[in-house]
Image (cartoon, helix red, strand yellow):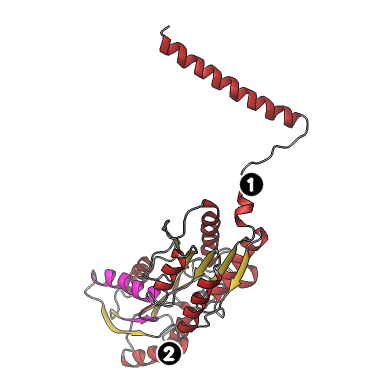
Amino acid sequence: MSFNHRRHLSRLLAGGILCAGLAAGAGQALAQGKGLDEPFRQPYLKALEGKTVAYVPLAMNVDLMQGWYAGLKKELEPLGVKFVLRDANWSTNAGAQAVTTLLSEKPDVIVVQNPDVQTYAKLLQRAEASGIHVVQINMRSSYNSSAYVGADWIEMGEKQAAAVINACKGKSNKIAIMQGQLSAAASAYTLTGVENVLAKHPEIKVVSSQAADWDATKAKGIAQTVLKQHPDLCGIIGFWDGMDVGTAAAIQEAGLTGKVFLATSGGGEQTRSCDLVKSGAFDVDFSYDVPSQAGSMVTMIKWLLQSGVKPGTAKGSIYTTLIPITKENASLPGTCWSLGKS
């Protein structure tokens, strides 16, 4: 046997003896009825206890924002994390002021939903430069912070457009697009996805593409006008189900439910998504599953707080899986969620 072989064998034997010793020690402790201390638990708990997470949604009167809030509180508060809510209440100025105030209060993490791609961008950059982690939810800004958790809006637009085009086969091929707020990520990026698909279907004619600014009343008014001008319309692509309850109402009042295919999107809340699909108000509602998003945000926050990573140096995106809600699955358990059970 060569010297190298003998040295290698000695190392293997030494390693085996060490492992055997550790195993024997653990075995003795267990045999004596003693538990083993988990060495990584206390550092985890210590990294989270006493930390502050601030939440700045667009408004707290919507199922999406309430669902995210409930999910974050449920997971973080039992670990000793202080949770701070700053409701922008649909005011871009109020939201910007809330983020500005938080810069001086210095929470450990800011979870923020952007009204558009520009307004909060520099503020979020300043936050991370000052040592605050920023997690953006569902509507991101032009600044790429520590984490984004939310829908892939381009994919959303592509899926919605494909659904409407498929429903228009053999019909007029006239469709309308009901946008949200033009400068919001959820509207601007979804429109790009829609355009990607329409570019492959020259037979489709877009007779209206207007912004309803996330307002159901405005969406209803726009849809009413379009349906009067184009009673043979075969489909509408709507960018949010909270807004498209107005679109659906206009279709119903025109006696065109089941004839004008309405594709929309939302967070998958029972009364907003599944119930309206079952009633025929929506033909398909692509859900980005709010409870799943809340879970992903919690995971990111826990990791950021214990990782030791300097705010702004780690960048990551978690695009949530889209769930098409149709009459085939709207009645199945687990397809949608309820605020009271979140």
Q: Residues within 10 Å of mark 2 (few under 14, many from 20)?
A: some
Q: Three-letter amino acid code at disc 2?
A: Lys
Residue 267 x %, y %: 50, 71
Image position of 333 (left or right of 161): right
Would you name the residue on which mark 2 appears?
Answer: 218
* Dot placed on the residue nearer the N-terminal end, 1 or 2: 1
Depth order, front residue of 102/303 = 102
Which residue sits at x=50%, y=18%? 11
Q: Three-letter amino acid code at disc 1?
A: Arg
Residue 338 x %, y %: 60, 71
Depth order, front residue of 245/330 = 245
Quadrant location, the C terminus: bottom right
Q: Residues within 10 Å of mark 1 (few under 14, many from 20)?
A: few
Q: Which mark is residue 291?
A: none
Q: Which residues are magenta?
A: 176-199
Q: Is residue 103 above or below residue 219?
A: above
Q: Which mark is residue 41?
A: 1
Secondary structure type for disc 1 = helix
Q: Is residue 16 visible?
A: yes
For the residues carrying marks 1 and 2, which lies nearer the camera in this image? 1
The magenta stretch spans residue 5 = no
Q: CA distance from mark 1 to mark 2?
A: 52 Å
